[in-house]
Amino acid sequence: MPKSKDSSPSEVQIQKSPAEFFAEHQAIAGFDNLGKSLYTSIRELVENSLDACESANILPEISVHVTEYTQKEFNKVAGLAESPRKNANDQELFQKKTKTPKKPPTEPQLTQETNESSTKKRKTASQDAYFRIVVQDNGCGMEHNAIPHLLGKVLSGSKYGVRQTRGKFGLGAKMALIWSKKSSGQPVRIQTAHRRSGTDIPTHCSVCVLDIDISKNEPIIMEHRKYANKENFIGTRMELLIAGNWTTYRSRIVQYIQQLAIITPYAYLQLDYENISEPQRNLQLQYQRRSEQMPPPAATVKHHPSSVNNIIVQQLIQMTRAKNLVKFLSTELASVSPAMAKRLIGELNEVDEEMDPRELTDAHITRLVQLLKRVEIFKAPDGSCLSPLGEYNLNLGIQFVQKPDLIATARDKPAAFEGHPFLVEAAVSLGGKTMKEGITVVRFANRIPLLFESGADVSTRVANSKIKWSSYKIDFKRDKIGVYVSIVSTKIPFKGTSKEYIGDDATEIQQSVKRAIQSCCQQLKVRLVKRTALKDAKERSNRLRKYIPDVSRSLYGILEGMRKRREEGDIHGDEYTSTASPSKRLRLDPQRSNQMIHKLKSGEMNEALITRALNQAIRDHQPQQDEQIIVAEKATPLFLVPLYNLDDPQYDVLDVLFTFRPIQAILNVVSSTSSPETTH
Amino acid sequence: MSSRKRQSTPAVQSQESTTTVSSSKRRVVAIAPDADAVLRECRKLRDAMRSSSNETSDKASRVIPEGVPSSIVEVDELKAPEVLEGMESIALDIAQQVLSGKGFSMEIPSRAATNQLYVKEWDRIVLGGKRSSRSFLNVKESRKAAITLRVLQLIHAVLMKRIHITKRDLFYTDVKLFVDQAESDGVLDDVATMVGCTRSNLNVVASDKGLVVGRVQFIEDGDPIDCTRMGVGGKAIPPYIDKIENITSDAEFILLVEKEAAYMRMAEDRFYHRYPCIIITAKGQPDIATRMFLKRLKEELKIPVLGLVDSDPYGLKILSVYMSGSKNMSYDSSSLTTPDIKWLGLRPSDLDRYDLPDQCRLDMTENDIKTGKELLKEDFIQKNPEWMKELEIMVSDKIELAILYTIGCLVVDKQP
């Protein structure tokens, strides 16, 4: 598709539309192969649905329905007539050139059967199939007129602000659209009901069937109509037909849904897989909602001065309504007050406070950016714009999905990486039926699971090499350790093109992850120690009893030996003299030994008696089981959300463990009924 | 101490003049012609020992010197019935505790490194007065308490039967309880300190390790032994030291050799005929039997002991075990240590004195130097300024006894 021709005939200059670019380089967006394409398509649609629900503050209810078709079935569904092949004898055309070992035709019938079954097996294992994916949510829906643009144009979207979002490039759903066009040629079908506020049932419903013109990066509208919402339809239903491979990525898709259930415990998730030709492979997965607590929606914030670059400043200049530089700097950037803006301008040559920002030259902008990066006194970006899941929800999510024996959660204080605030929440779990021995790291970035490239990820690296597990009484080889790290940020520093992992060269993030995990481990250690103490107390009597036979046999043996020796009159042998001073050496008290010998002779003293006495002693000396331990075992954890950056400490009530601060200042008296908030 | 003067010119001995082969095929080695000259210093030492030995009686050395806590644990040589009585008294005490329904607990002198003292006046390590208790009702100690009682009973039975067993025997008597031989071995020393006897009094012995050859005769359990007629290899030093009696000898000194190879060389050359002596080796770190045997020989024969060890920190350390005792056996150091062993060689200063060629010298490894520097801090080295000097030279060079063969055994011939 040459758009303009250069004078040189050998070099043709081609301009590509974004849609074309991504269609050709689909691996960038996670469409590496058929299996992964299926996985990514599902994932992108699900994440869009979650965003749609959360932006309207609705508890999400998302169902994914995957139907597998063979090519034949697909043709039927897609309305393609099964065209009879003109040359039915040309089998070679469709066969791979492989050598099949010839079997001696001894039992012809049997051989044929096995042949048939083996080809069938190969079919199911490796042959790629077509899938209908239907994702339905109860979110805010899309506005009727905006639908084609939202879905049919690559790199257009609502996620470009400085805000914590799941997606980043406005690419996901559109890539699925491109993939559907590429692999099956089928358009997507969208049914949606847009609602303006959270609760009312929308009056109208839209149906849209979309194709995409890849060379123009424009949607092709095949059907677009609006009708009265009589069936009380809520949310959005997306339906697409793509090629894929379920067998190779089944476990990944299941894992994704499972981890999504951990990180979004306030959502109802459902996955149905249906195989028309082989119903025994059908699969159904359901995760009920466990929490009504939804994290607050993330706020869009202004750029932090330390995170801007030339291009961002230029964009800001284009968009700003500010008429002079002071106003521009103080309104378009975070943490810059008018006074600060004046100080900054004072540092720059050739510009003054009243200058129109649009008059800035490229050189001015470069110098301004350099200055902004050098200044150290800007207030660090705070985490208030972030929307972490919260320890309570994280705990619930893990409890429900993995059912571990022990779990601890922690949240590190917000920090900034390259001018973007981030916040790390971590949980460490021990035990759980489905967990493997050793460390399993589960990673989340902006509340979506990261499944691939775990080896190089910051969380994996920290968990495997930076944490000294043994010092927390955890055996990292044999204990079933689950490490869950959730990082939220206005910009997650992903490595590579696809959103798969965060490099561990982001030092601030690495340290924060380490602190969070360590904090979890410390909590676990306390509980592990208490647990072992409790267990020890229980096992104590058993352990002691084990040695009773040895002790009573030995003790009785010596006493019996003493008796025998006395009878033989050995005690006053002629060799009974040594140079040792008699006072120093241990001597038998004649009275006591005589008593004992008497008892031994009469049978009053015997091995059974010793055994009984020892048993009695063990029973009597059972230390009181520490009631505190038992209480601690039964207690449910209390989750307090830490508040940082509170400015008004004058009504604080300080305690060793926490600080009480009335949210509304109560004058003269600090009442115990004031609503407590804690600060660390 | 090291007042001996060394002859600075090594004299070369001609083998033919001293060695003849008799008709009975027994090699007869005549006394070296320069023996008198060489042994002069040695005899001086011997005479000094014999004249002073009458004054320092056994009891005098028992008096605890000033500055040493009186609580130190020193065990005595006890007769079997006394050991039995001690054990029974312990058992009786335990039985009383058990019957009163309180379980039982034992007080055992601690053999930890922190409880070891070096007594300058005695020139040996002794066990301090710290005690640890072992209670049956304590989960952490109950196993150890059971093992201790079991070992007590086993040894009681052994003593009753008047037999000796080895440590390995003891372990195999109740493998199920002991699990690891280190457990029964360790408890053995606990029992000895509890009763207050030496470990050999418990009739538990280690297997043979030491060798002796040379001009000494004794009766072992009724059999006459002549260590000049023990063939090339010599006699194994028996662990039953109390069965050795009537030690007689015309040797002028005892030569203590670290390496078995050096011992074999001298035994085969019948070195002990050329210079009348008794040669002993424990093949490295000495065991109890060898140490006790050496002590017996020195006390009964009253002849000087000369040590021939590698010129490295380990050689010196081995010498120190003979002289001052080991930390593990410090409770019995009085019957195991032989004070006043003369460090014959190889001294680091010998390297240059005899102009030993470079090929014989090994570089000190980092570990050697570390050990050497630690030795410099030890009391028994610091009390001897000449040794300090040698050790400081040593930290720069090390020499193995094996080099003596490369230069034809001349130095050994030359130097008592």
Image (tube, grey):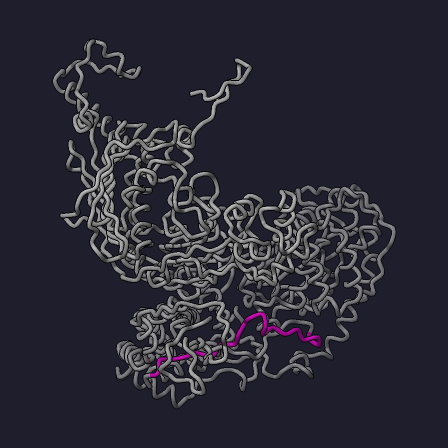
**Is residue B107 found inside the magenta-colored segment of the image?**
yes
Q: Position of residue A497 (x, y in %)?
A: 45, 38
Q: Nearer the viewer, residue A356 or A443?
A: A356
Q: Position of residue A116 (x, y in %)?
A: 17, 22
Left or right: where B172 falls relative to B212 = left
Residue at 14%, 16% (x, y): give it: A107
Task: Kindly indicate the quadrant of the structure image that contains residue A149.
Answer: top left
Q: Quadrant of the N terminus of chain A?
A: top left
Left or right: where A188 falls relative to A593 = left
**Is residue A482 found inside the magenta-colored segment of the image?**
no
Q: Is residue A93 above or below residue A414?
A: above
Q: Nearer the viewer, residue B171 or A171?
A: A171
Q: Would you say residue A572 is visible in this rendering?
A: yes
Q: Would you say residue B212 is visible in this rendering?
A: no
Q: Nearer the viewer, residue B4 or B279?
A: B4
Residue at 19%, 50% (x, y): give it: A203
Q: Position of residue A276 (x, y in %)?
A: 16, 33
Left or right: where A462 falls relative to B318 = left
Residue at 40%, 73% (x, y): give it: A677
User: What range is drawn magenta here?
Assistant: B102-122
Left or right: where A73 falls relative to B22 = left
